[in-house]
Image: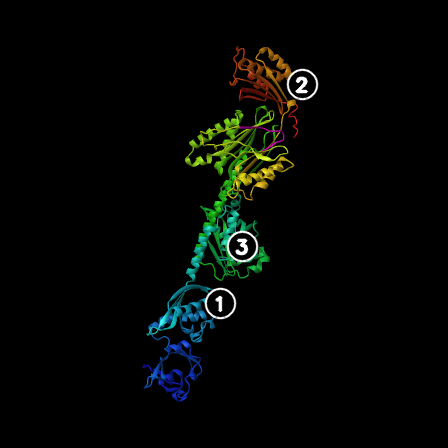
Amino acid sequence: MERVAAAAVLDALGRVTGWSEGARTLTGRTAAQVVGRPAADLLAEAVPAAVLAARAGTVALRHADGRRTEIALTASPVLGADGETTGYVLTADPPRTPGTGLAEQAFQQASMSMSVFDVQQRYLRVNDAVCRAAGLPEESLRGRFFLDTVEDLPHTRGFLSHLRQVVETGRPTRYESFTGAPALSREHAWSIEMWPLRDPGGELTAVALAAFDSTEQYLARLRLALLNEAATSIGTTLDVVRTAEEVVELIVPRYADFASVDLLDWVLSAEELPGLPQGDIVLRRVAHGSANEGTPEAAVPIGETEVHLEWSPPARALREGRAVVSQAGEREFRRWVQERNARAPEGRRYRQGVHSMIAVPLRARGVLLGVAVGVRMRHPDDYASDDTVFAEELGSRAAVCIDNARRFARERSTALALQHSLLPSGLPGQAAVEVAHRYLPCGSVAGIGGDWFDVIPLSGSRVALVVGDVVGHGIRSSATMGRLRTAVRTLADVDLPPDELLTHLDDLVTHLAADGSGEEVAELGATCLYAVYDPVSRRLALAAAGHPAPAVVLPGGEAALVPMTAGPPLGVGGLPFEATELDLPEGAVVALYTDGLIEDRDRDVDRATEEMCRALSAPADSLEDLGDNVLKAVLPEQPSDDVALLLARTRALGGDRVATWDVPPDPAEVAYFRQAATERLADWGLDEAAFVTELVVSELVTNAIRYGESPIQLRLIRDRALICEVSDGSSTSPHLRRAHAFDEGGRGLLLVAQLTQRWGSRQTGSGKTIWAEQPLPQGPLPVSDP
């Protein structure tokens, strides 16, 4: 078909002086109707300034039937003889008929939204995809300003800004947007590309764009981002309940409008796992959350049991070991919602609009721990197959974190039980000191440490006070602590001085480290403080192996650290330990503690030590109260290490309870000392113990005179037991042996062992002391508090 060009001629004043047949076809007006009239009468709106300046562009005309018609118009000046412009020739191509040509068909039928705007951001062309999204035909959009066709929202203003940017820069642009459209039920993600259109002369005349619906890719990226976030936001603590709460916080409201995590009871109790029950499954609600404040739609409160009926999606997910999706309209879904409403009718109105749910089993290392449930109400999309893959991956990561927390809780519980079984549950009776103790296991992820303490009765009414700390945490440290505590008790039974005891203990730790793998050496390192208090001499002897010095509070005074040299930690080997001795009055308080009391990565040690001394100096009603006051004043809210605190208030055995005699090395004097001991027992009202005491004194003094060296001393101590001690200048220790039938001697110590409660010997700085204890007939005598 022959194309007829539309042309018109204007004079210098803008009046129409010529009109072609193509112009009549385009506008529906004849030459008689327009020639001689101003061209402005034909316009539907004023010609844009940019078009006037360029003498080319889109102009809106009013058709004879009243409708608006936009045409691409070009104005060519008509020159007179002197070169002046005497008028213009306007030419325009008639509008093309849609659907002509492959290019037009490709544009119109493209699956992506495509459109063309003029430089004033008015629609020139749109394809069918744009019409479907806008819910309007192309005729309703053509020629209209973009903002006149949409709501004035941030994303629409952003779209307009990009259109203008292309016009101003002449360069294409690409960006992404997540917006809705009038005819779409929900928001979509769009990948939008805009590029300039130019005429043959290179002039920018329009902007074309294509918008690709990338919603699926966008949602996939969101799911991937959630999985990446799960790696850092789930499992920040080794607490089962907190881990479940982190799962809920992650997915609400981005992935679900309501979410819950229910676990099997054995997971929370850190016990061995039972088999998964058949039929209805009973779980414990540990966490839930909602887009509604307070989670009013929850049918089960936190901490209560949730019974998932056999047919319910959560029960199916647990039995089948996979994510189960259920949608509104399905029978099981309706039954599940009805069961929720019947169980908690007060939350019924908050469940309005629920249309989709997904139940995901929480499985880690082949073990089922519980189930997580996500429900959508406000979210417009149902859960789909892509969501099941994502949910199972998220559930797997969450289950591993929950299982790690469960395993930590179980190991912590085991270590704590082991440690409690190894630590003294009740301190042995003794009269040398009044004691109070505190032990606080830390709550950090490192686990239970190896802090320990002990009070060990020694011969001669003395008492040993011990605190120690094994490097590391967990069951291994607790077990090592138990070995060290046993070793200290064994060495204390030998009655070694503090520095010698630590030397033997150091050798033991070194051997343990050498016998183990290199992985265990660090666990076997330890610190220890060993102190011995004698209530007769009122002297405290102590030595330390890499351990903080104790604090002493004199009656009516302030607490101060004991000036002493702390030797190397146990296990270093080859270095000496130094003993320190000091005299203490009756009523002095000695505080032994582990480094967890004063050391922390966020605290200054010197300042914490000052706070401890200040708390120890403050008045307290009892030693127990003093221990509580120290912990409250010094410890942070969440200690990062175990803390052991042992407080001992000294007592004294005065001269009225101790009798001492110097013994000359003459066997004839033995009878005198038997009589002297008998008389002292009579003064103490212990006549019933006289017979045994005479035999013990006779045998021990006789052995000292016969086999020992001067000086020889006899001492009786009336304490919780009656103690008989004989000291001499020889370091040779006695041995209990069985005498043969015709032996004249060798039965003395055997007789002593049979008649007394216990006996033994200890080395002293000038020799040795052999001692024997017998219970008092009337039981332990009361000891007055200072």
Q: Position of residue 197 (x, y in %)?
A: 36, 71
Which residue is identified by label 1?
153
Give the numbered dot on residue 682.
2
Q: Is residue 707 left or right of residue 206?
A: right
Callout 2: helix, strand or loop?
helix
Q: Earlier in the sequence, mark 3 or mark 2?
A: 3
Asked where in the image residue 455 lies, by quadrant, the reply is top right
Residue 347's place in the image compared with 99, above or below, is: above
Q: Which residues, given as a range, are shown in magenta?
A: 580-590
The answer to whether the residue labelled 1 contacts the one labelled 2, judged by CB atoms less than 8 Å apart, is no
Tell me the quadrant of the picture where the N terminus can be found: bottom left
On the rendered structure, is 129 left or right of 751? Answer: left
Q: Is residue 526 above or below residue 250?
A: above
Q: CA distance from mark 3 to mark 2?
A: 80 Å
Q: Is residue 685 left or right of residue 27?
A: right
Nearest the eye: 473 or 549:
549
For residue 129, say whether it is visible.
yes
- What is the crowding at mark 3: few (fewer than 14 residues within 10 Å), some, or many (at least 20)? many
Dot 1 or dot 2: first in sequence order is 1
Closest to the observer, 287 or 433: 433
Q: Secondary structure at mark 3?
A: strand
Report the mark closest to the observer, 3 or 2.
2
| Residue matched to label 3 | 289
**Residue 197 has which mark?**
none
